[in-house]
Image: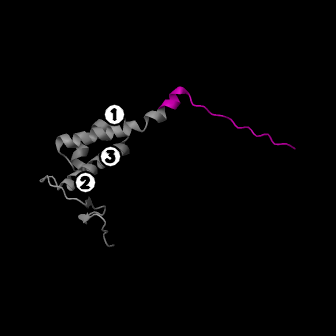
Amino acid sequence: MSTIVVRPELTPTPEQAAVPASTPHAPNDHANRVSGMAHAEDVYHNHPLRELAYRGLRQAGVGSQAAQHTVKKAAEERAVRLLARGGPDTGRAQAGRVRSAVPGRGVVPAGHRHRA
């Protein structure tokens, strides 16, 4: 008795082939737009930035969870940049400082860890 093995080749239609190529650019474009809004309005907290940007993201076809994630990441990035600069009130740099990943623990010098 012999076994026949068939290996079908699936080729996407031109429309299907174009989707993966354009997919990575859309979230980055939205994130850049939100980041620009944060800079223009001088907002670096999640909730106020969400009030500014969320509706526009949803109208652009971004899903609810993705829109919230985009706003959150833009706000965090803006806060980190301001912190590295010395905060919103000063322009001096604080080299080697990073934002803590642990809520309520404040700023930790680079290379140091919080104790559990």
95 or 3: nearer the eye?
95
Q: Are marks 1 and 2 in contact (CB under 8 Å)?
A: no
Q: Which residue is mark 2?
A: 80
| Front disc: 1 or 2 | 2
97 or 2: nearer the eye?
97
Q: Which residues are magenta?
A: 1-18
Label 2 amino acid?
Val
Q: Are marks 1 and 3 in contact (CB under 8 Å)?
A: no
The chosen color scheme is one colour
Q: Considering the image in quadrants, where does the N terminus appear?
A: top right
The answer to which of marks 1 and 3 sits earlier in the sequence is 1
Compared with residue 95, is residue 20 higher up or lower down, i.e. above or below? above
Q: Is residue 113 left or right of residue 7?
A: left
Label 3 amino acid?
Gln
The residue lying at 57 percent from left, 31 percent from top is 12
Q: Which mark is residue 68?
A: 3
Neighbor class of circle 1 (other Cα within 10 Å; few <14, some 14-19, many 20+) is few
Compared with residue 96, is residue 69 higher up or lower down, i.e. above or below? above
Element type at mark 2: helix
The answer to which of marks 3 and 2 sits earlier in the sequence is 3
